[in-house]
Amino acid sequence: MMDKKQIFTALGMQDLESGAFAGEWLKTTGTELEVENPTTATTISRIKQASAADYERVIASAEETFLRWRMIPAPKRGEYVRQIGNALRDHKTALGALVSLEMGKIAAEGEGEVQEMIDIADFAVGLSRQLYGLTMTSERPRHRMYEQWHPLGVVGVISAFNFPVAVWAWNSFLAAVCGDTIVWKPSSQTPLSAVAVSRIAGEVMSGSGFEGVFNLIVGKGSEVGDRLINDRRVPLISATGSCNMGEKVGLAVAKRLGRSLLELGGNNAVTVLDDADPDLVARAVLFGAVGTAGQRCTSIRRMIIEPGIKGDVLKRLVDAYQQVRIGDPLDPKTLMGPLVNAGAVDTMLAAIDIAVEQGGIVLAGGKRATVKGLAGHFVEPTIIEIGRDAPIVQEETFAPILYVIEANGIHDAIAVQNGVRQGLSSAVFTNSLRASELFLSHEGSDCGIANVNIGTSGAEIGGAFGGEKETGGGREAGSDSWKAYMRRQTNTINWSPDLPLAQGIEFG
């Protein structure tokens, strides 16, 4: 188990870090930000945040570099990303430990997040040779039509605390091979991980002449965040966070007719039918609801279950919840670390009280957790059986609370699942081909992700990640999500001596 000193030494971190990288580390002029360890409620390190003037230097770096970076062949851009991926391999253990130290997810999940960065780097390298356009048939003789994709410009990436490094990689590696440059504003809860990643990427890019591809800005939302989302020099903002944050970002970007890629809240549900394997359900729900202390956007919030299997599954889950080891996330024996801050604990406990007031019955957990020798933000993972119409289950509480809701049949369960404003991830557990195909059909799940006999968490690189409704509609990581980072151009070439018009129009 690595301690802070070992982590900082391995990553070249200091007790006071600059909050801005613009091809080089800036001597930032903003206020100092103390970064808390949620396990101990003590300060890990400090960041000298960026000011408005620092922001301008970062944007200038991204703009100037873009003009040259866009003309580098995409496979050569992919080579730089490949090298960054290899550097992440070299720093996987230390960077994963820093994520755990700063955010609170267990060590296996911290390293898993870094592995996700490595995987998306590999994906982006292959993508750099596959930025395909289409050739189309023209109605005019001796004409050729085709489409091509051009680099977009400076891409702003706003990431959330719960995945402090992977979300940056999803966006930045794809954007980079597409020919864009990046300005990253990380969560103020987890800026150290962003500094460490920026240092790794900066070392790879050093001496290339393209040091300004991957830029960083750590600062207050009012100081730099608002500038970023309102900046016409940034044609795309990719933002991950709450629905409230996404609404603010989406409105600001739309007002200037820019593009936004939004990955917002997910009130995710698993549907469990009577013919499901109860052991499989229990294992999937345990990880989906308790992993990352319930602080994944894909965490299971609701279990919609038929009455015939409910008793068996709940017994297994309650037994499993009572055996969850809560503690230091860097301890390999720990299954659940702390919530990110004291406010998250207060929010969770308030939600439990509201759920009880609305008829909910607490079956497991429901309280703060005490961990010997640690003064961090620990809670007990919680199971609450509750009615489908309770207002509290319509909202997402970013904490390890699982609401159990009874339903009768697949159609009823789908109606309950879809009856919320969020639409990120969903799953059904069944051995019925008809039920599973119904769940995946046009009249089934309305979420961006729909699974059968696996949970809602743990999306793989290669598939497009994102959701519908108030989840924002954005797609990242796989499939053709790369198109969000480029601009499409349709081209028509006349190689004849004549000038026929489309639609048979005669003019003159």
Image: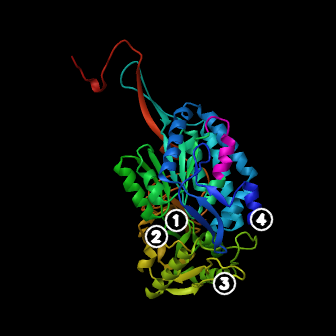
Distance from Cα at disc 4 to Cα at disc 3? 23 Å
Q: How many marks?
A: 4
Distance from Cα at disc 3 to Cα at disc 1? 33 Å
Distance from Cα at disc 2 to Cα at disc 3? 34 Å
Q: Which residues are magenta?
A: 197-210
Q: Is residue 271 visible?
A: no
Q: Residues within 10 Å of mark 2 (few under 14, many from 20)?
A: many
Marker disc for residue 197:
none
Q: Secondary structure at mark 4?
A: loop
Q: Secondary structure at mark 1?
A: strand
Q: Is residue 362 above or below residue 336?
A: below
Can you say which quadrant of the picture contains the C terminus? top left
Image coordinates of residue 349 in percent, x first then y, are 52, 82
User: Are dots 2 and 1 in contact, CB under 8 Å?
Assistant: yes
Residue at image point 60% right, 82% down? 314
Image coordinates of residue 452 in percent, x first then y, are 57, 63
Distance from Cα at disc 2 to Cα at disc 1? 8 Å
Q: Which residue is mark 4?
A: 2
Q: Residues within 10 Å of mark 4 (few under 14, many from 20)?
A: some
Q: Give the mark nearest the N terminus, 2 or 4.
A: 4
Q: Give the mark nearest the N terminus, 2 or 3.
A: 3
Kind of residue sitting beneath label 3: Thr
Q: Mark 2 or mark 3, which is nearer to you?
A: 3
Q: Which residue is mark 1?
A: 426
Kind of residue sitting beneath label 2: Gln
Image coordinates of residue 299 in percent, x first then y, are 56, 68
Name the foreground residue: 302 vs 440.
302
Q: Which residue is mark 3?
A: 370
Kind of residue sitting beneath label 1: Ser
- Residue 198 is covered by the magenta coloring: yes
